[in-house]
Image: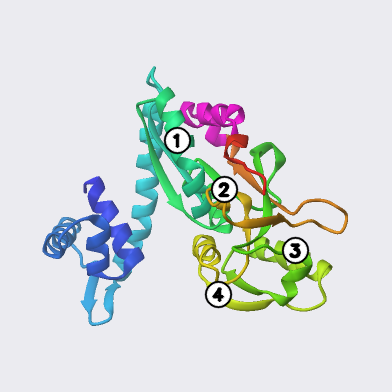
Amino acid sequence: MEERDWLILKVLYEQKNITKAAKKLYLSQPTLTARIKHIEEDLGTKLLYRGNKGITFTETGEFSARFADKILKEIRIFREKVDDMQKDIAGILRIAAPAIIIKYYFPKLLGEFKKLYPKVKFDVRVARSSDVEVLVNSLEIHFGFIRNDNDWPDDERILLSRNHVCAVSAKPFKLVDLPGMVRVDYDTDKYYKNLLDDWWKETYHDAPIIGTRVSNLDMCKEMVVNGLGYGILPSILIKEYPQLYSIPLVHKDGKIVERRTWLIYKKETLDLALPKVFKEFLTEFDFDSFQRNC
């Protein structure tokens, strides 16, 4: 079997649907169907059945799909080792981060790294901080960028930046006004939600008035820009909107409420040349250039 056949089995098992699998593999449905038939003929057994509700794997198919995962991982490790033996730094750097980090940090960050090592390619995944941790632990990626203070070992993480959390509105306001103002709220990770909830409870007696709820930070920002309420947002998100009024949130002890950005990894990842130089690059990179106080 060819490498692409193992990938087909893996994606089919994940999607459980021919149409979705074909789309993810950039194949037409007839081409994918023909390839499945070829794989089954090569193995001499039936791997899956198609039905109205998708595809169902046989026992052999289930085993083959799980085995495909192992084969693809071994192939990836093999290629990384081969790349590592070359004189030039090359290969694919696999990283994952929440959408806000990718949007505001990665274009400049990866662009600067690419200038130093032009043969490097990138595999970038969007994931919440909790999912990023899982990907790093499983060694599916080299590095993860997260925005919570978790229990990750200190010798396998680097603090990259601190970003103020601000109350933001299209109109002038004071922090004491917030309980009487309409708020635009958004879905976020558990750590950040708890951070904001704890600050609110220690500062006010009344619950916030939620006028609009949206799915992410960017959408919240746009609602605030258009006067639909105030939002509580990281300062990096509003640096391009000088017309907005913003005030940093402060705890009762005087400390500013902030979100930290961490780089996390596993020690064994640094045995490879590419991840090693990327870590060194990050320790010297000026992350403060992204920051702007409220």
In percent of width and height, residue 140 lies at 46, 47
In percent of width and height, residue 239 lies at 57, 48
Region in magenta: 268-286
Q: Amino acid at mark 1?
A: Leu
Spatial distance from mark 3 to mark 2, Cα to Cα? Answer: 20 Å
Mark nearer the N terminus (1 vs 4): 1
Q: Amino acid at mark 3?
A: Lys
Residue that badge 4 annotates: 213
Left or right relative to 1: residue 170: right
Mark nearer the N terminus (1 vs 2): 1
Q: Amino acid at mark 4?
A: Arg
Residue that badge 2 annotates: 239
Which residue is at 29% across, 65% downward? 61
Mark nearer the N terminus (2 vs 4): 4
Mark nearer the N terminus (3 vs 2): 3
**SS at circle 2:** loop
User: Which quarter of the figure has residue 59?
Assistant: bottom left
Spatial distance from mark 2 to mark 4, Cα to Cα? Answer: 22 Å
In percent of width and height, residue 91 lies at 37, 31
Residue that badge 1 annotates: 110
Assess disc 1: are there few (<14), some (14-19) or many (≥20) residues with their C-alpha within 10 Å of its C-alpha. Answer: some
Q: Amino acid at mark 2?
A: Lys
